[in-house]
Image (tube, rainbow, N blue to C red):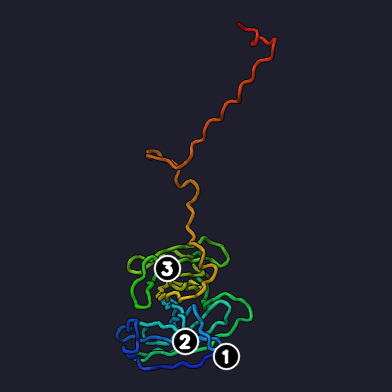
Amino acid sequence: MGASSRWLAWGAALLLGAAAGPEEAPPSGRADIQGQLRLARGVPVVGATILVHPVSSRSELHVTATDEKGAFRLDGLESGTYRFEARRDGLEPLVKDSLAVRYPYRAIVEATMEKAASERPAATASPPPSAPGAAFAIAGTVRDPRGSPLAEARIRLVRPDGSADPVWARTGPDGEFDIAGVAAGTWDLEIQGGGFLPLRLRLDLEQSTRLHAKLVPHPLGYVPAPEDLMPPEEPIPPAGLFEARPGAEATATATPRPAAAPPSRPAPPGSPSASAP
């Protein structure tokens, strides 16, 4: 199937509050992108990661997942031209470099995804490299489909080549998170919340970035990927972190016990110690 036939429809429709369904309508003056992804036989693509950002900048990212019907929606976008990406393990990625978003219209995307010829990691386009040693901040908000803040969502950053320790964060009651001092370069970013489909994307961090994430509930009967069933990893404190310091009330280091003396043996008959009174 050619690339042109994979995009079944894209365009715009009037943005009507009545059509927003159970989700919140986007703020006044802002538009949204919505659509549906399917396989060749009409089977919905569940759990695909949808990523959009302005063509002129990667500092503002909007990300969500497709639901049990293969549908998705990202709202609250300023008018402009966006890059659209849809990725899921085992499927060829869909990328549209120029998608117009204009209030009061809703951008519509309907496309067919195909089986991947070979496994490949999801990745956004790589910008020019930063200066060695550069570090940036990643902050953002995680919300549910109704736009309510999602507390205790887990954010994890991992180097694909394992060259650095993972970076962890959790959202607060307001759904916000802020990770400072993240080294420039490529990171695999994962967002998970209890009862929601995970979001995974590869991020080429070359500037401080703000992320707007909307999680989608797990569909009934959905079989998660094996990595989603593993308990979250917890960082291990470095050795010596709990050693006693002067003035400390308690210590977590174990005190070695003195070695036990070897058992004494009876002296043989005729020895001085045996004949002593």
Q: Are marks 1 and 3 in contact (CB under 8 Å)?
A: no
Residue located at (44% from left, 45% from top): 242
245 is higher (above) or lower (below) than 111: above
* 3D distance between C-alphas at marks 1 and 3: 36 Å
Disc 1 is placed on an element classified as: helix
Identity, as a three-letter code, of the amino acid under mark 2: Gln
Q: Does residue 131 appear anywhere in the picture?
A: no
Disc 3, SS: loop
Residue 226 figure quarter: bottom right
Left or right? Give the position of 23 relative to 188: left
Of pointers 1 and 3, the one earlier in the residue sequence: 1
Residue at 42% in and 75% down: 217
Q: Nearer the viewer, mark 2 or mark 1?
A: 2
Kindly tell me whether residue 164 is visible in this rendering: yes
Q: Which residue is mark 3?
A: 194
Q: Residues within 10 Å of mark 2 (few under 14, many from 20)?
A: many
Residue 186 at what x, y percent from top left?
53, 70
Q: Position of residue 28 (x, y in %)?
A: 29, 85
Foreground: 181 or 45?
45
Q: Residue furthest front?
A: 221
Residue 139: x and y in percent read 39, 69
The circle on residue 36 is 2
Amino acid type at image mark 1: Ala
Discs 2, 1 touching: Cβ within 8 Å: no
Mark 1: few, some, or many residues within 10 Å (few <14, many ≥20)? few
- Residue 161 vertical placement versus 273 (above, below): below
Q: Of marks 2 and 1, which one's residue comes earlier in the chain?
A: 1
Most extreme residue toward the top, as rendered? 277
Q: CA distance from mark 2 to mark 1?
A: 17 Å
Q: Position of residue 220 (x, y in %)?
A: 46, 76
The earlier-in-sequence mark between 3 and 2 is 2
Q: Quadrant of the C terminus?
A: top right
